[in-house]
Amino acid sequence: MRICVYGAGAIGGYLAGSLARGGHEVSVVVRGAHLAAIRDHGLVVDVAGDGFTTHPRATDDPATLGVQDAVLVTAKAPSLPAIAAGLPPLLGPRTRVAFLTNGIPWWYFQRHGGKLDGRRIPLLDPEDRLLNAVGESRILGGIFWPASSVPEPGHIRLTHPGRGTVFGAPDGVETPEIAALAEAFRTAQLPVTVSATIRDLIWEKLAFNLSAGPMCVLTRTPVRATQEEPACVAASRALLAEAAALIQALGRKVELDVERIVATNQQLGHRPSILQDLLARRPMEIDALYTVPLEMARDAGVPMPTLALLVGLIKAAARGEGLYAPTRG
């Protein structure tokens, strides 16, 4: 299968290396030192101390790659509008484009059904750049549960195996193209499922991210370090309660096991990706993870005071360091 991974960082690099090792024709769109390292030395993936190296085709010009069977977009949400123009050369009539991003995805209301169907999120897709580039029929939702990092250019480290990858079309219909992509993951020994209710799972992961992520950003510590103070554990519980209220108001079906999430957080030594971005001084996914959920809560009449306070502090700090400027549609 011809698969292009657009943005082969922590998530994309792990998937690209694994899919290439599984025998698929993999290409990656990357830039800078990461691109140079992959071209010169290959893409190194380290899983529990057991590393392997593959040599996917690497470029910073997607127009050189041709039409793909599938495109996995793993670039961070702030980068997505800028890469929209690079996607059309990769797309044929049957190509599916899976967006494996954190937080609420830009396409969330496409084929949603009901009164919200087709609603736009200009903060995440200004001027409909992504929608116009990809087309509604090609959109595929994606969730990546494992945790990974980039310790140096060309080197990906899996830090927590998580629950694999989930794909799902916005309308819940599994097409032959989606089934073929899932099978490609299985042949590469990548855990994968296809869900007819991808939005429920998006909220499940987002609630998990909200339970400790904002405190990680403010303290600049791994997840478990934020759970050593009783007041922070109480804040985690409050964040989960607020998320659960919003999820219910939106009509999604998600069972949040608060005690399991708290127990997981107390053991998790991983730094969330938004904290990794802060430490590396990269643009942060504040809007997809925090601003848009808060806007949805406001529209639904659901108060989220704990999250609102933490997000206000995060935005003030990020603006002060030049790492956050909200996109305007």
Image: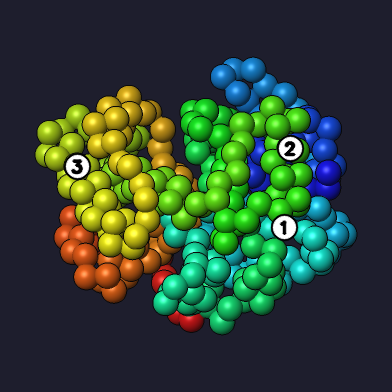
Snapshot quadrant of residue 190: top right
| Residue 133 drawn above or below residue 198 | below
Residue 127 shows in this picture: yes
Query: What's the amino acid at mark 3?
Result: Arg
Judged by depth in the image, the label closer to the viewer, 3 or 1, is: 1
Give the CA separation, mark 2 to mark 3.
38 Å
Q: Count residues near mark 2 (Cα–Cα under 10 Å), then give few for <14, some for 14-19, many for 20+.
A: some
Which residue is the site of mark 3? 237
**Mark closer to the chain start, 2 or 3:** 2
Q: Residue at x 59, y 51 (%)?
A: 168
Give left or right: position of 12 versus 180: left
Secondary structure beneath dot 3 equals: helix
Which residue is the site of mark 2? 183
Q: Residue at x 15, y 33 (%)?
A: 229
Q: Position of residue 295 (x, y in %)?
A: 32, 70
Q: Nearer the viewer, residue 83 or 24?
A: 24
Badges 3 and 1: C-beta atoms under 8 Å apart?
Answer: no
Residue 156 shows in this picture: no
Query: What's the amino acid at mark 2?
Result: Glu
Snapshot quadrant of residue 230: top left
Q: Residue at x 57, y 43 (%)?
A: 166
Q: Position of residue 177 (x, y in %)?
A: 75, 52
Secondary structure beneath dot 1 equals: strand
Snapshot quadrant of residue 291: bottom left
Secondary structure beneath dot 2 equals: helix
Q: Position of residue 196 (x, y in %)?
A: 55, 50
Q: Nearer the viewer, residue 247 or 223?
A: 247
Judged by depth in the image, the label closer to the viewer, 2 or 3, is: 2
Query: What's the amino acid at mark 1?
Result: Arg
**Mark closer to the chain start, 2 or 1:** 1
Q: Count residues near mark 1 (Cα–Cα under 10 Å), then give few for <14, some for 14-19, many for 20+.
A: many
As drawn, the label of residue 96 is 1
